[in-house]
Amino acid sequence: MPEERGASPLELALGLMLIVVPVAVVALSVAPVFEHQNFARRAAAEAARTLVLASTEGHLEARNLVTALAEGHNIDPALVEVNFCGGSFCGLERGSVALVEVIVTVPEVSAFLPIGDMSVRAVHGEQVDPYRSRP
């Protein structure tokens, strides 16, 4: 039987390099997608709440809020799209539901995985208080 001492640590190191490094690269490359998805969820929820509670100019206040949140998360506001009530004007009558959709474009995820830009989307609905008196 030939002498093979010292070969197993080398095989272990190469094996880990071939398994752990690619998994780590993929995990780090996909993380921005989840970061943008979480931002979209939060922005949609906050914008819907702002839209429902605003006394006047709720749509403008909600858009400004989403822009401020994007800047706070180091996301280019030009990559964020906000739609209200399916693209139409939201009637904010008592008991109605205001829907806000936030679409965020995630730029090239990684140089290692050239899959291009991706879009993530979140929709949130907020009910207008049925007993609220509006000015």
Image (tube, grey):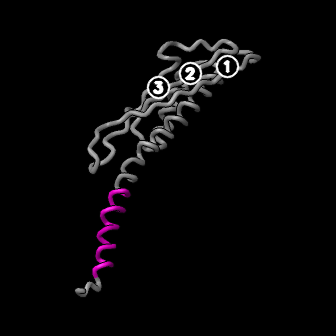
Q: Residue furthest right?
A: 131
Magenta-colored segment: predominant secondary structure:
helix
Identify the amino acid type marked 1: Val
In the image, taking residue 93 as reference, residue 117 lies left or right, namely left
Is residue 100 shown above or below 106? above
In the image, taking residue 47 as reference, residue 55 lies left or right, namely right
Q: In which quadrant is the N terminus drawn?
A: bottom left
Q: Which mark is residue 21?
A: none
Q: CA distance from mark 3 to mark 2?
A: 11 Å
Magenta run includes residue 123: no
| Element under disc 2 | strand
Magenta run includes residue 8: yes
Residue bearing the label numbered 3: 82
Residue bearing the label numbered 2: 99
Residue depicted at 53% across the width and 34% down the height: 43
Identify the amino acid type marked 3: Val
